[in-house]
Amino acid sequence: MALPSDPRLVRMIVRHYLRYDRDNPFIFISAVLAFLGITAGVMVLMIAMGIMNGTQKEFEKKLFVMNYPLTVISFGKGVRQTTMEKIRRELPGVKISPFYTTQVIAKYGDAIEGGLLYGVDFAKEAAINPVFAKALDANRSYGRYSLIAGDDLAMTLGAGIGDRITLYFSQQQAVGFGSIPLQKRFPLEGTFNSGLKAYDKAILYTSLEAFHKVLKKTPDRYDGLHLYTQKPMEMIKKVKALLPDDADVEGWWQQNGNFFAAMQMEKKALFLVLLLIILVASLNIVSSLLMTVMSRRKEIALLRTLGATRREIRQIFFRLGLFVGSAGIVAGALLGFLGIWILTRFDIIKLPADVYGTSHLPVDLLPGDFAMIIIGTALIVLLSSLYPARKAASTDPLSVLRNE
């Protein structure tokens, strides 16, 4: 039957061993290095995971704006007007913007740039796309051939508001005995800025009527539908049930699945790599405890002969490791939150907005990630304290006192 341990004895010995020992200063220094290593590891992990999450959320926000929550696409001759009316009738909370799309070459003066032209209903598109809505002037009306372009595209072409940009289409038109690409001049009546250069340099908007007139599109069929709902992951199944066999629906997360999967994999890899910092620091805990055990062999043997149990000896050294590790975790968490607060409060690090979509470093530490950091570090500290504690408890007092 195991004898009960005396908690007062354990606490007293632990406090004694935590003090600086002039005869063995390296033991204390090793413990301090372990504390600093765990502190640095937890702090760096928190800041790194916060930056990863913040960057991912910033990209999600930008991609969400220009990719729409849900998009209905057709595998046949287009999405029928009756399908759009059915979705509007069955799902009244969903906002719908029908669209046409085609690739074009934009030309103004001597400048030429490729782009993707969308034909939309300006009012319906503005209701679901705040970037597009911001580019419109509420005090004016827009004509059939009005053109809204990304500000980077307009800047590359050197065109300003009111200038006429020539768009070349892939379709051909007959001229004499031959044919040339279909072309049409569109007045530039607005520009938008989504925050992502890839979109601002490639996307243009015009009216549905322009596609009807220039490309002879059928008014009762569309290339697709942009849908807005606050719960796209729940609504996608309901929309899919209302579609015919020649149409399907995609969520914005599916259209960019590879991108976000790569970011998630990078986040996990970063977590594991940075966790190695804590693992290295935990080796200092092991070495410092083992050196303490070796230097205190006489004291351990004396305690055993005075009645201290193996369990009490094991608890003493186990608590020593826990104290160093726990102190490092608490200090690292406090410094981590301080670092995140400084990065979010002050613009210490500037980012190129044309690459990242924002000039401010986004930092957002999720509660789940913080809990994972604390739990992972705590497990490493626990495991690091077990072996030295067992080594100390296995000390044979007779052989120690006989030989030393």
Image: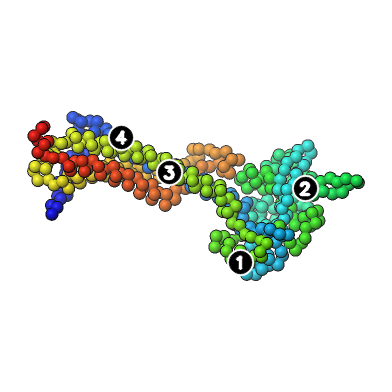
* Residue displayed at 61% across by 64% down: 240
In what quadrant of the picture does the C terminus appear?
A: top left
Q: In which quarter of the image is residue 155?
A: top right
Q: Quadrant of residue 163?
A: top right
CA distance for labels 3 and 4: 22 Å
Q: Which of marks 2 and 4 is in front?
A: 2
Q: Mark 2 points at which residue?
A: 170
> Which residue is at the front of the view, 65 or 217?
217
* Residue displayed at 44% across by 50% down: 366
Of labels 1 and 3, earlier in sequence is 1
CB of mark 1 within 8 Å of CB of mark 3?
no
> SS at mark 1?
helix
> Which residue is at the front of the view, 39 or 169?
169
Of labels 4 and 1, earlier in sequence is 4
Q: Mark 1 points at which residue?
A: 241
* Residue 327 visible somewhere in the drawing: no
Which amino acid type is marked by label 2? Ser
Q: Which of marks 4 and 1 is in front?
A: 1
Which amino acid type is marked by label 4? Leu
Task: Give x and y (percent) for residue 119.
Answer: 73, 54
Instruction: Give residue 72's mark.
Output: none
Q: Name the residue under label 3.
A: 271
CB of mark 4 within 8 Å of CB of mark 1?
no
Question: Dot 3: within a 10 Å radius of its alpha carbon, few (fewer than 14), some, or many (20 or more) residues?
Answer: some
In the rendered structure, the answer to whether residue 380 lies left or right of residue 395 reads: right
Q: Which of marks 1 and 3 is in front?
A: 1
